[in-house]
Amino acid sequence: MVVIHVKFGQEDEFLYETTCATSNDELIRGLVKLNNTRVRIAFLCGALRELGTHGPAKPMGEVGIDHIQEEYEGEQPRKKIEKSKAYSEDPAGNRTGNGVGEQMQQVFEDVCNDGEAYISKQQAKLRKALTQEGMEDKLANMRGAVTMAYPMGLPKWDPVYAALEDGEHGLDGTQAESGLLEPGTAQLWCAGKEFVREETVGDRVGKNEKTKVVVKLQKPGHGAPAREPCVSEEERKAMMAHYFKRQEEMKALAEANDDDYLQSGWADTKALKNSLQGLNMNSVRAPGIR
């Protein structure tokens, strides 16, 4: 299998397996689908935690911070907001505040942790390739957890409902939308050269099935991606610290007096003689001096 190592910088990456006979068009479409599903899972992990803590989203006309709406709205006092036992006011005012309770919150947390672990960049470091089936399984777990908490279903305007039921279109208008790619226009680059859709993977990387290549997947119109730095951010910081320390040492040596070494014990020409005679010159003091 040809291993495709997709990188979006130092902090986001994943592996994908294909063959030399696969067309580049099929490869790009498969990578785009994986990327978009990863974006959905990442969005749902955050949205599910908010759902568990602060409950379903409010309709557009009722959005507002609860305690302010209770005190005053327009010229008339607002009726008291319905609050459940698991009520926790949403500081953003987008949700009702009626969460799902501690037990279901833990269920939500478990499925979110599982999803985040599957799409994490650590998978690439462990040499584990992502599959569409694996990510669909994580989405199914999230859907099952929501069904357990809300058997009658979520309102259609809730972000969790939209992301689960409407697919990629459910992310329209959210920050996550910027991470989505179009399968028909996305570009794939490797070593400064683009994967031509009319060719095969073997035409681009060679006929060896045991090949691994690092690629960049991006939107059209950006040209060849810039080369990545040769060292990581942690390595760069360590090198800078070493160079700074060395610079300070050289500066101290330049400012030191040339005769300072004469006061050191290793520069005493009579050190061997004194040691053989049992004399310790450091203990010799003038009379009256301690």
Image (cartoon, rainbow, N blue to C red):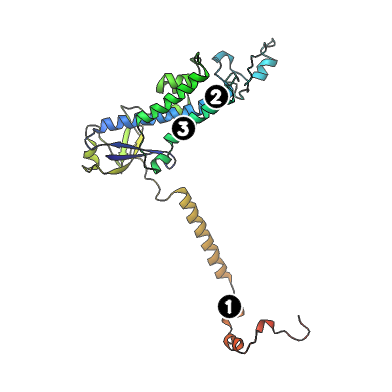
Res 109 seen here: yes
Q: Residue 175's spot in the image, x, y percent?
A: 48, 28
Q: Residue 164's spot in the image, x, y percent?
A: 44, 21
Question: In the rendered view, would you say 225 is above or below 30?
Answer: below
Mark 3–mark 2 distance (CA, rounded to whole Å) = 15 Å
Q: Nearer the viewer, mark 1 or mark 3?
A: 3
Mark 1–mark 3 distance (CA, rounded to whole Å) = 63 Å
Q: What is the tally of numbered marks visible in this picture?
A: 3
38 horizontally vs 244: left or right: left
Residue where numbered disc 1 is placed:
261
The amino acid type of the residue labelled 3 equals Asp
Residue where numbered disc 3 is placed:
114
| Circles 1 and 2 in contact, beta carbons < 8 Å | no
Q: Secondary structure at mark 1?
A: helix
Residue nearer the viewer, 94 or 111: 111
Between discs 1 and 3, the one toward the N terminus? 3
Q: Residue 112's spot in the image, x, y percent?
A: 49, 30
Task: Look at 44% across and 49% down and name the residue there.
Answer: 232
Which numbered tag is attached to residue 183? none
